[in-house]
Image (tube, rainbow, N blue to C red):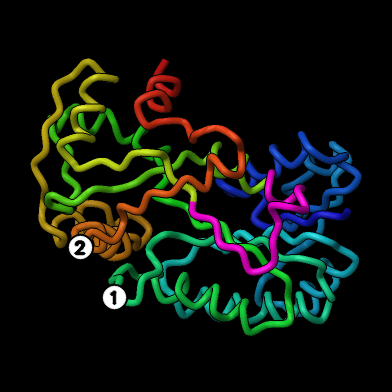
Amino acid sequence: MKYIITGATGHLGSQILKEVMKLVPNSDISVGVHTVSKAKKLSDQGLEVLPIDYLNEDMMVKALTGKDVFIYVPSKSHDSFSRVTELENVISAAEKAKIGHILAMGFIADQANNPFDLSAFYGYLPRRLAESDLHYTIIKNALYADPLVPYLPELIERKNVIYPVGKEALSFISLEDSAKAFAKVATDDELRQDGKVYTLTQDKNYTMTELASVLTEVSGHKIGYQPVTLKEFGDMYDQGGEGHMLASMYKAGGMGLLDTLTDDYQKIMGRPATGLKEFLTLKLN
């Protein structure tokens, strides 16, 4: 089996690559990167490094030809139109390359009434794959728990969690657990079912008062919950033009649309996902 992983130098893609390398020989793995010269460490490990530009169909077809499993991690963009345009090129190239199976990253914020800036893309993804000629599996992630670690000093200083989601709960998964599940599904014929959609979450979701309690326990500093408005949150965290996207995500959270829980991780890995308290404790020590 020949595998190709895109986004292999990004947060999730690099973690998926690390986990796939534990399961199959490096000689069976190719990685798609925007700048080949920046991926010398990967080629030094015996991986085939290929130039990838999601908007260059010919380049995509060349990279995907001869591959059995394509792990597709979308590029980082802040609007659905950009990602849908990218997806159309990816699907067209995958069909022309006659790729064996595409394993695509989704997100829980994909409901029809979800106001998240990227919800249209995540809602479009399964429908577009379903009407394509491709064999596919989708793995949807809950919110990543990892950003809570570098964010914690700010929350300690503020003495409050400030996410504007009211009394609703949020569900989480760690990047590491997500990557392990991606690698397992990619390399397991029984799990890599055509048309299957998995949703990765921990076994508990958290209201903001519950999240504040966990953060208090792991940090040793009293942290409460005092939400700001959606506009205030967007203005506060608008670095890189991400403010509106982040605010729209927490608007969805305030509507109860980001609290999904499943046992899919258990089904894939044979054990529960790492709990939030355990994850934070490990990262902080």
Position of residue 182 measured from the top left corner of the image (x, y, whole percent): 63, 48
Q: Quadrant of the C terminus?
A: top left
Q: Is residue 13 left or right of residue 61?
A: left
Q: Residue at x 50, y 34 (%)?
A: 272
- Any part of residue 34 in sight: no
State which quadrant residue 278 falls in: top left
Residue 248 vertical position relative to residue 219 in the rendered view, above or below = below
Give the amino acid at mark 1: Asn
Which numbered tag is attached to residue 113? Answer: 1
State which quadrant residue 35 falls in: bottom right
Position of residue 107 measured from the top left corner of the image (x, y, whole percent): 45, 60
- Any part of residue 160 in sight: yes
Q: Residue at x 46, y 80 (%)?
A: 81
Q: Are marks 2 and 1 in contact (CB under 8 Å)?
A: yes
Give the amino acid at mark 2: Met
Q: Residue at x 20, y 43 (%)?
A: 207
**Segment colored magenta:** 184-199
Position of residue 102 measured from the top left corner of the image (x, y, whole percent): 71, 65
SS under mark 1: loop
Count all numbered tags in the image, as a single digit: 2
Front residue of 46 and 122? 122
Q: CA distance from mark 2 to mark 1?
A: 10 Å
Report if residue 196 lies within the magenta region: yes
Mark 2 Cα-neighbour bin, 10 Å: few <14, some 14–19, many ≥20 = some
Position of residue 117 measured from the top left corner of the image (x, y, whole percent): 35, 70
Q: Is residue 207 left or right of residue 15?
A: left
SS under mark 2: loop
Q: Is residue 108 left or right of residue 3?
A: left
Residue 285 vertical position relative to residue 19 in the rendered view, above or below = above
Q: Residue at x 60, y 76 (%)?
A: 87
Say which residue label 2 marks. 255
Front residue of 95 and 78? 95
